[in-house]
Image (spheres, rainbow, N blue to C red):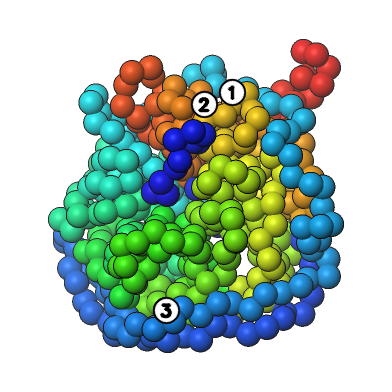
Amino acid sequence: MTPSPLPLLLAGALVLGAGACAAPGIGAAGPRTGTGSAAATDGPGASATVASVASVAPVTPVAPRATIACIPGADDVPPPRPGYTIPIVDLAHEAIRRVVVDRVPGQYLGHPTTVLLEDGATILCVYPEGHGRGAIRYQRSTDGGLTWGGPLPVPESWATSQEVPTIHRLVDADGTRRLIVFSGLYPIRMAVSEDDGDSWSDLEPIGDYGGIVAMGAVARLADGRSMALFHDDGRFLRNAGKRGAFEVYKIISDDGGLTWSQPTIIATHASAQLCEPGLIRSPDGGTLAVLLRENSRQHNAHVIFSNDEGESWTEPRPLPAALTGDRHIGRYTPDGRLFLTFRDTTRESETQGDWVGWVGTWDVIVHGTEGEYRVRIMDNKHRWDCAYPGLERLPDGTFVTTTYGHWDEGEEPWIASVRFRIEELDQRAADLGRGG
């Protein structure tokens, strides 16, 4: 979990689209300074393979900066403002859309991530018993999130998780599919399943480095490799224990997630505290955008772009207030627009601190405009503590988004899932425009 300053407190996203701007790449990748050696570990009932990286880079490399002709820079987009003007579709009181994923009286349950398997119906979810730190709970829904069977058995090492767990699907160059659960701080650890989550390995270090919200996003690159993103504030990357500059990192796997490279810095800023990367791929597949939380609360959220599969990145640029939030996760709608969900940290917003969504297009993100409308998904009774969401789109177009929050006054947070179709949201937005 990224620590939040007290005065104003209020997550990628992996989106694979079908964009717009596939100019030739600029620059070269930061060097890989470590390679993995595989080690087999046993989870309950079966075994899976994990790996660690032994070598440590004395200096963390920085990815080259890119200038992309069709991506405006900070001086070429509307100046960032503290508030937004687009309408808000409010689903907060529509209990019929909600499913209780997990709720335990007196127990804090937080920060879920989800993955939808290839059958289009099975959703897997991991989350901690606590605020980031705590034993990992693991659940499966086989009907697209309508029902959940309760926490499943997991390896004992999952009780030692120190930070927000995340679950991701990885596919190697040969098409082999794996599931990986990451757990952050020092060192970053992971567990692997090679049977679609029926059995899992123990948590094992991926290398001699650490980080926060690992992994915020994972993407399969054009050459079949995998890229994972996380951040650190100086305390955990090399276990220094001293807070410093916020930096966002990438690591690369050549083998479907079994081993990982040393980190390379892809974003940092002189005054903004950028963190919690959420990744979106353009509709044509040629450009990556990473949306970044801003933790000092003195700036809007930011975005960076790459058109060479993450080898080089543009300088961070502020996002409009309508997209300012924490832990952005997104998916494309059936008609090619984007739905993103996040915690609202906009400085001037009637839904500040709530679980919200945003509807717009890839081009809106590129050109720094506001989008079509926002959505309040649920009303958080705490000032900020909610909404590191999972988000899936089912084959019929239904969105299923899942997160934690203080949904009842005075109660510990619990995990809820909300369902909707983009047509429903569009109709509600149209009704607002007509005064309905």
Q: Is residue 387 above or below residue 174?
A: above
Q: Camera-side residue: 106 or 353?
A: 353
Secondary element at image label 2: strand
- Badge 2 vs badge 1, beta-carbon distance below 8 Å: yes
- Going from N to C along the chain, the mark reached first, 3 or 2, is 3
Distance in Å between CA atoms under marks 2 and 1 = 7 Å
Number of residues whose C-alpha sits closer than 10 Å to that of mark 2, classed few (under 14), some (14–19) or many (20 or more):
many
Q: Is residue 250 visible?
A: yes
On residue 91, the disc is 1
Number of residues whose C-alpha sits closer than 10 Å to that of mark 1, classed few (under 14), some (14–19) or many (20 or more):
some
Residue at x 35%, y 29% (from the top left corner): 413
Residue at x 34%, y 71% (from the top left corner): 238
On residue 119, the disc is none
Q: Which quadrant would the C terminus be assigned to in this image?
A: top right
Q: Which residue is mark 3?
A: 262
Work out which residue is located at the far top of the displayed protein and give it. 436
- Badge 3 vs badge 2, beta-carbon distance below 8 Å: no
Amino acid type of the residue tagged 2 in the rendering: Met
Secondary element at image label 1: loop
Q: Camera-side residue: 201 or 205?
A: 205
Task: Indicate which label's residue lies in the foreground, 3 or 1.
Answer: 3
Q: Is residue 190 visible?
A: no
Amino acid type of the residue tagged 3 in the rendering: Gln
Distance in Å between CA atoms under marks 3 and 1 = 43 Å
Amino acid type of the residue tagged 1 in the rendering: Leu
Q: Which residue is mark 2?
A: 378
> Residue 323 location, x and y as percent?
66, 42
Query: Residue 128: which quarter of the image?
Result: top left
Residue at x 76%, y 31% (from the top left corner): 86
Residue at x 39%, y 83% (from the top left corner): 57
